[in-house]
Amino acid sequence: MSFLRYFVRRLFLVIPILLGITLVAFIIANAIPADPIVANLPPNALNDEDTIAAFRKKWGLDKPLHEQYLTYLGNLLQGDMGLSIKWRKPVSEDIAKRLPATIELATLGIMYGVVLGVGLGLVSAIWKDTWADYVARVIALIGVSFPVFLIALIFLNVFYAQLSIAAGPGRLHVLMRPPPTVTGMFTIDALLNGDWKTFSNALSHLILPALTLALYISGIISRITRSSLLEVLNQDYMRTARAKGLRERYVIGIHGMRNSLIPVVTVIGLSYGNLLVGSILIESIFAYPGIGFYMFRASTSQDFPAIMGVSLLFAFIYVGVNFVVDILYFFLDPRIRVA
Amino acid sequence: MSSISSISSSTHEFESPSRLQQARYHLRRNPLVSLGIVVAILWILIAFIAPAISPVEPLKQDLVNRLQAPGELFFMGSDELGRDIFSRVLWGSRITIPAGLSVIVIGSTLGVIIGAVAGYAGGVVDELLMRLTELFMAFPFIILAMAVTAALGPDIRNAVLALSAVWWPRYARILRGLVLEVKSQEFVEAAHSAGAGGAYVLFRTILPNCIAPAVILATLDIGTAVISFAALSFIGLGPEPSSPEWGRMVSIGIDFFDQWWMWLFPGLAIASLVMAFNFIGDGLRDILDPRLRGE
């Protein structure tokens, strides 16, 4: 199968899922709350007939349900997710402003997480049932079992408050000015501006939250790496590779790793969902002004339109990432190319 | 008759060790499983006897002694209203454990029914239910639960309902596959030809033969359910703020960062409970999945 055909076929599978997500979001936003008007408008606007009438008209609330959905979809396509109750601003605007910060954190987090997770998995598969295996597995179990907000608080307390070897909350030192906005990601913008001081400061603020995220997702990644590699290590072709005199490094690195990679890539895609949830919990503790912090503040003050907006965005990102994973299979699994 | 059965059972034992012996063997090889079982039982016990053993009422305020560090007066310190953290942590088990278990029970039952009906009915019903399952799996499930809880209004019951509502898809998928496998076997055909109705065959003949994997998955899932519930209540979508719920206590503790005992102890309570269930689940997986034993 050619790459293009595979790509297009996968793409067509994604479209109904995206539509389905908007349908689920629509149902949650409009059908579950006893009264969508009460849920979506600030309390003091509920006495104002004009505001209510305008809200009804905009979301087509006087029309039948299927027309409401089309109105909702139309508004969504124009990037309209409604007004936040708490901040009185369009949700999409707030999200767009905060998204780069979260992308910056999530990217670093997943990089650390993959290195840590695959590393731990490798160690515990290669030296199975030795003390190294036990240590690696216990670290992985801590990552899965400790609530991520507790890890964040412990890290912040130990490395920032007690030892002062890491930067504290926020994205930059309070007295520093953000670099001129190009991408909205402080590290990249600072680099583009040639401003090393801002770059290193922004990076140092990213390290603790990114490490927390990494520990959180590495548990699952290492577990899958371990079991996938263990399964491959028992295969006949591994014995063949050893028998023909290959060095252990090549046996594991080329024959072992490559064949055990597919489930690992799948789980990295799936753990992106955890990463997004983790960002909500972690950003709220590190006072890191991204989407997660926005979601945290929206949900503690029951800002319904904002919660729905972020949920929708996270679902879209999640589907997007898993689409990319699907595309990666094409390169990782030769069987797809032959089929 | 009895002598025959005793002979056959003794030869059986000779051929392969009894289940009890097998369990004992695996427990010895997996000390973490035993640790998990002990800790889990301890927490469940605490949940039952918390009212009897906690030093004070979890909601009792003592404003004179607020924000006290752990010491003689308060074993785990006191919070911003002078409430005893230790008592609150003990009482918290009475919220979190039932909440986590309810999510598993409701969610897995829902999934088992949906998957079984899809697999048994086939055709359009199967297609519809499975597309729905895939749709739910396309969401990161806690995010979906957050949206549902926010829509229902935040409280414990709604958080549990919302989590259950997003918990079922994996169970549905597994059950559908198993039912498809079992449904073509002869004893099912026999039940049909004996005149049994569709629902009877599905729930009485087929389902008992495919329920075990769902039960195992449910055991593996308890830790995740507990931690998801804690996350929901951490972001304010669970019980009300004064409630002695662990996630909620940690989230209030953020504002009192330097009073570490306010967030550390409830956080460790969650961690120890989840870890216990994960140790048990991990051991169970090792025992049941021979591929991982590396024979």
Image (cartoon, grey):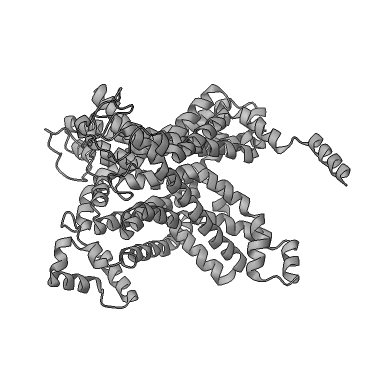
Which residue is drawn at the image coordinates 37% and 56% (left, top)?
Answer: B158
Which quarter of the picture shows residue B241? top left
Front in this rendered view, residue B27 or A114: B27
Which quarter of the picture shows residue A197? top left
**Against A68, is A166 above or below?**
above
Give the position of the C terminus of chain B as an image quadrant. top right
**Against A133, is B230 above or below?**
below
In the orientation shown, which residue stands out farthest toward the front?
A: B52
Residue A142: image location, x then y, percent = 44, 32
Is A240 positioned to the left or the right of A53 in the image? right
> Would you say residue B10 is visible in this rendering?
yes
Front in this rendered view, residue A132 or B52: B52
Residue B107: image location, x then y, percent = 48, 55
Which residue is drawn at the image coordinates 63% and 34% (left, top)?
Answer: B293
Is A193 positioned to the left or the right of A137 in the image? left
Q: How many numbered marks, from 0 up?
A: 0
Residue A291: image location, x then y, percent = 26, 48
> Would you say residue A282 is visible in this rendering?
no
Which quarter of the picture shows residue B290? top right
Is B34 positioned to the left or the right of A35 in the image? right
Residue A101: image location, x then y, percent = 24, 43
